[in-house]
Image (cartoon, rainbow, N blue to C red):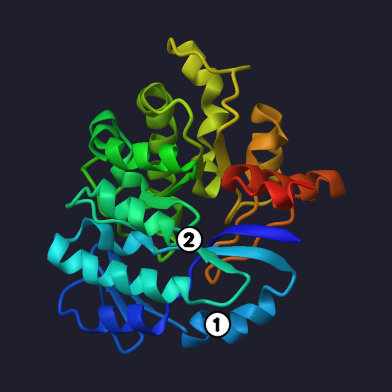
Amino acid sequence: MSVDVHQHLWTPAFVDALRSRTAPPRLDGWTLHLDGEPAYEVDPADHDPAGRLARDEDLELALVSLSSPLGIEALPPEDAWPIIDAYHDDALGLPAPFGAWAATCLGDIDPARLAKDLDRGFAGLQLPATAVWDEAGLARVAPLLDVLTEHDLPLFVHPGPATGPEGTGGTGGPGWWPAVVPYVQQMHASWFAFAAFGRPRHPRLRVCFALLAGLAPLHSERLINRGGESRGLVDPEMFLETSSYGPRAIDAIIRELGVDVVVNGSDQPYATAPDPALGDAARHAIAVINPSRLLNRKESRT
């Protein structure tokens, strides 16, 4: 049975929390309003648990997470925590095969609170890439990453809000722009930032980067030409998730890093899990063996 490490499912309490807001991120009916992105019409059927269960009938585990591009983690604590708590309570109440990544408020770094949430049964912690894309950000969240290491649970790095510091890609353009430009740039930066600044501080932490880390590992030749060291050195605890890519990109990443660090993710309801088209052995590694190692699910590593 397969594992999908990357889904989103908006539960009733979470939807109600977004509808109660008067400023972005907010829901007006089913119209989502975010800073820096065009208004988005959410299809309620996309977040119907029964419909998702039917689509996920072949999965042993489907991990849902807070939608980090909404920017909830960056809200003031008095605004962020009620939404995060609503997400946590509903996510833990979802039926099998659903599990969930924990979320946190970046304006209130609280290791003790994270430890309690992890003890409730979350698979690990998700952080937006914008929180870990430089040395300062990684230093700020280091106490949270220490908690993950203590619990032997992973970090999942997901794109954050499309708005960001000048020079990171910005927003605007066609509807696909945020997902193809700022999100990819964020993941690219967070991959290299963790390798350079995070790994020395957290040598045992397992980390999974959404959307193949924006294909950052494919830049190893340029890294070497500019004085870095990477090619031939594979960090077995830095994983890459496959959502929104396909066989060509997955094949290129495997040629660079090997198959053992690639894990299956769909980003449902916005995309479906890609078929790597590399044969049954690779498919089994990506959808079963590797996610089990990422999540420390020893009973499923067969």
Q: Is residue 27 visible?
A: no
Neighbour tally class for label 2: few under 14, some 14-19, many 20 plus, Cα within 10 Å: few
Residue linked to disc 2: 121
Q: Is residue 125 visible?
A: yes
| Residue 146 percent location from the top left of the image | 35, 36
Against 59, residue 166 (above or below) is above
Residue lying at 23% horizontally and 49% vertically, measured from the top left: 110
Residue lying at 78% horizontally and 50% vertically, measured from the top left: 283
| Residue 92 percent location from the top left of the image | 46, 71
Q: Amino acid at mark 1?
A: Pro
**Label 2 vs 1, first from the N-terminus:** 1
| Residue 293 percent location from the top left of the image | 64, 42
Against 258, residue 18 (above or below) is below
Q: Tell me the number on the disc at residue 207.
A: none
Nearer to the camera, 279 or 169: 279
Q: Decide if residue 15 is on the left or right side of residue 272.
A: left
User: Which image quadrant: the N terminus?
Assistant: bottom right
Q: Decide if residue 51 is on the left or right side of residue 166.
A: right
Q: Amino acid at mark 2?
A: Gly
Q: Decide if residue 97 is on the left or right side of residue 224.
A: right
Residue linked to disc 1: 49
